[in-house]
Image: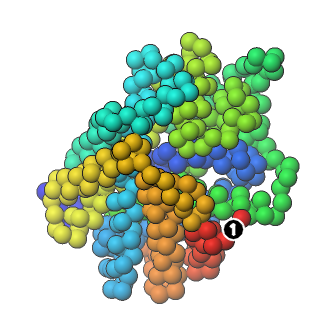
Amino acid sequence: MENKKKRNSFGGSVGFVLAAAGSAVGLGNIWRFPYLAAKDGGGIFLLVYVILALTFGFTLLTTEIAIGRKTKQSPLTAYSRLNGKAGFMGILACLVPIIIMPYYSVIGGWVLKYFLLYLTGHGNDAAQDSYFTGFITADVEPIIMMLIFLFVVAFIIFMGVNHGIESSSKIIMPILLLSVIGIAIFSLTITHTDASGVTRTGLEGFKTYVIPNLEGMTLGKLVSVFIDALGQLFFSLSIAMGIMVAYGSYVKDDANLSKSINQIEIFDTAVAFLAGMMIIPAVFTFMGAEGMQASGPSLMFISLPKVFDAMGSVGNVVGCVFFGMVLFAAITSAMSVMEAVVASLMDKFDMPRVRAGIIETAIALVGGIVVCLGYNKLYFEVKLPNGAIAQILDIMDYISNNCLMPVVALSTCILIGWILKPKTIIDEVEKTGHRMGRKTLYTIMIKFVAPVLLGVLLLTTLGVIKL
């Protein structure tokens, strides 16, 4: 039995890095990063993203992992251990994964459906114009797929930190990485001539991805690119979700935290780049520059199946590998989201892992069914403060990602930067005798730069600042 009196730990730094990277490498990297890169001038977005990852992302990632290891607590209880008045931050940090898990399970079910479609040789069905809409508006099948995905994730969490999260990450992550690299290389080699006789190649698509496009670039556009990259970092690094606090609490006291954080940064940024490298050249080759206007579900479940269909006989194989890779990415991310809640219940209420897992699975199950029904029986639309038209899944995504996550991150910066002081985190990172790199940068970021950036991001997503 695993409880707060006897806490499991990752067996080694490799297991921790792979689990944390698995959390970071999720749907946000695969369906949002390529779209933003295509929209925001290719190489310009990449440059801004890398700079922010090495500064802003590094600061929040380091802070959350160090908080977890220092307190040996999950998000719900870690903040109050640091400061008695910071308990509300733990509640908000725990609310984020509670809200995310139901709709992430639904999307995971969509990925599972498409993987099975390509696995059984029926990938061409997915290329039909109305297929995706017909599937998500069906009464039963989306719920069944969501159930299967959720129960696979729950089973891994029930197995615990070592036998569940760490062991599965060591198997899944190398396969995922090899799949991404393989598809990315394949995307560079393809050539297609359309009906009008225009020939495009994957290499041309790659150039549009990595070469900065300064056409129409104004100061306002550059600010928009900056905000997009900043928002993407939350998805890419799993920060402000309580996840890294929970994972940090399982890191042994003698582990080199600074080295592990650097490895997570490199792993995540590399996979995000490869995600763009695998998607943008393929979509450009078969659909032209206008094909990259799609993002999120429409990119993954509508545009890409058309690309795979246009590839001919090899398309079904590529589609199968692609959706298998996406399924692995979704599972590792969903594992971390569920673990943040399960660990919180265990620490707060001294609860056995299995009971905590059953409670969180039940919450996700009920919420997931509501999200599925949001496309048929419970369908409605509302206009969000940022101007987007939304239904149930979008509303949950907006509350968790656009509202709560910036608030959690901003509160964390104020707590560490001004109340407890940056030395609290620096001392935790360096307590094994390993020097923390970028110490001066960390102090400046946590006290001054990050709070300002987060304030601007929050006001932008709430619609107060118009870009």
Which image quarter is the C terminus in? bottom right
**Does residue 72 appear in the picture of this structure?**
no
* Residue drawn at x 80%, y 18% as measured from the top left: 196
Rendering coords of residue 30 (x, y %): 55, 42
Circle 1 is placed at which residue position? 466
Total marks shown come to 1
How packed mark 1 is, by other alpha carbons closer than 10 Å (few <14, some 14-19, many 20 or more), is: few
Give left or right: position of 338 versus 201.
left
Residue 1 vertical placement versus 273 (above, below): below
| Residue at the spot 79% in from the left edge and 43% down from the top edge | 211
365 in relation to 223, above or below: above
Q: How is the image coloured?
A: rainbow
When the figure is inspected, residue 371 is found, relative to residue 119, above or below; the finding is below
Q: Looking at the image, which is closer to me, 414 or 227?
A: 227
Residue 400 position, x and y percent, is 45, 62
Q: Which residue occupies 36% across, 78% down?
A: 88
Residue 343 at what x, y percent from top left?
27, 61
